[in-house]
Image (cartoon, rainbow, N blue to C red):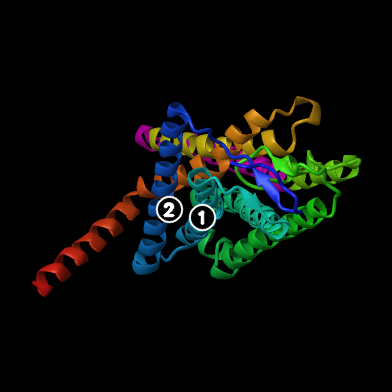
């Protein structure tokens, strides 16, 4: 591909090279993206169709699935098209839009995961007060707050990133426009912006992550007081799987956005970014939803209706 760039467009160098190993890795990433889209679409359909899933927990899960679908759809198709066609140019507007959408969804998911952990804490520790503490209005406020805070962070970082002067090469060594990767190209002192970005990350990542750890600690403390060994075993299995996915998401995001500049590596950043933009969106429906007996029941009922409808048509 001809990398000469005489315009203000940026060049996304991508995640993969055209080698046999990288072709296999590209196929794996594409498969994970498709699995993520299918899993999250299925969750949205089941939650929408089955009235038994019209509860606060599944409402929050539907928002998580929506965010994951949008995040994968924003990043993977363009990355795949660039790899397959060799056309890797992206306009400043398109780059800013990618930064805004990815940070809106990533930041929104960060707060939404904290809201979901609070929902589980209330369900376990205060079951009698659950209808009041997790009413429809509370759920809507949590969801609106998550989307709004994510959008505010995305807007600030997108506008600030594109307002900086950039060197002539405009080559972004990444598979999508991400603020830290773009800022590396700036031909100006970016220390103020990096400090502001660090403060935003403390609010967007460390605060929700601390709330999640607190919620799950209180859940485990409540479960340990139960006499049922089976209940304790199930609670530990559920909490450990939830925390594993949460750890991947927050760990990857903290690694990208809060690591000191002197320790940054473009090769590492690209791989780690794939964890919270592609890998965890695939895991979320498996860990949070499809292992749940209520979701399995909804899936069986939906499948049964499809089979009955097919028999009636034939």
Residue 209: x and y in percent read 65, 41
The quadrant in which the C terminus is found is bottom left
Residue at x 71%, y 60% (from the top left corner)? 93
Disc 2 or 1, which lies upstream in sequence?
A: 2
Rendering quarter of residue 258:
top right
Does the magenta run of residues contain 126?
no
Looking at the picture, does residue 182 appear above or below residue 311? above
Residue 196: x and y in percent read 84, 46
Question: In this rendering, would 121 be left or right of 39?
Answer: right
The quadrant in which the N terminus is found is top right
Q: Magenta segment, which residues?
A: 204-231
Q: Is disc 2 in contact with disc 1, using a CB cutoff of under 8 Å?
A: yes
Looking at the picture, does residue 118 appear above or below residue 230? below
Task: State the residue lying farthest toward the bottom.
Answer: 313
Q: CA distance from mark 2 to mark 1?
A: 8 Å
Rendering quarter of residue 308:
bottom left
Residue pointed to by mark 2? 37
Residue at x 61%, y 43% (from the top left corner)? 212
Q: Nearer the viewer, residue 98 or 55?
A: 98
The dot on residue 182 is: none
Residue pointed to by mark 1? 73
Residue at x 51%, y 43% (from the top left corner)? 83
Q: Secondary structure at mark 2?
A: helix
Residue at x 59%, y 40% (from the top left corner)? 14
């Amino acid at each position: 591909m001809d990398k000469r760039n005489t315009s203000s467009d940026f060049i996304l160098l991508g995640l993969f090279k055209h080698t046999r190993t990288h072709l296999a890795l590209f196929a794996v990433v594409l498969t994970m993206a498709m699995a993520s889209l299918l899993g999250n679409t299925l969750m949205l359909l089941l939650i929408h169709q089955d009235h038994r899933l019209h509860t606060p927990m599944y409402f929050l899960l539907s928002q998580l699935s929506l965010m994951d679908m949008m995040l994968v759809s924003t990043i993977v198709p363009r990355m795949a098209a660039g790899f397959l066609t060799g056309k890797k140019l992206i306009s400043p507007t398109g780059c800013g839009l990618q930064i805004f959408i990815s940070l809106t969804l990533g930041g929104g998911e960060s707060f939404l995961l904290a809201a979901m952990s609070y929902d589980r804490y209330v369900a376990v520790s205060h079951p009698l007060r659950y209808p009041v503490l997790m009413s429809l209005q509370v759920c809507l406020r949590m969801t609106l707050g998550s989307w709004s805070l994510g959008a505010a962070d995305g807007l600030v970082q997108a506008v600030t990133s594109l307002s900086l002067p950039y060197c002539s090469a405009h080559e972004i060594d990444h598979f999508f426009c991400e603020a830290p990767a773009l800022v590396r190209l700036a031909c100006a002192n970016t220390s103020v912006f990096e400090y502001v970005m660090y403060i935003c990350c403390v609010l967007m990542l460390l605060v929700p992550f601390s709330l999640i750890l607190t919620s799950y600690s209180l859940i485990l403390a409540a479960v340990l007081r139960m006499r049922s060994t089976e209940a304790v075993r199930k609670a530990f299995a559920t909490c450990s799987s939830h925390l594993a996915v949460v750890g991947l998401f927050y760990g990857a995001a903290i690694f990208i956005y809060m690591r000191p500049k002197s320790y940054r590596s473009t090769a590492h950043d690209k791989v780690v970014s794939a964890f919270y933009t592609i890998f965890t969106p695939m895991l979320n429906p498996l860990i949070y939803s499809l292992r749940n007996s209520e979701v399995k029941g909804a899936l069986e009922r939906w499948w049964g209706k499809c089979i009955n409808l097919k028999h009636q048509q034939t």
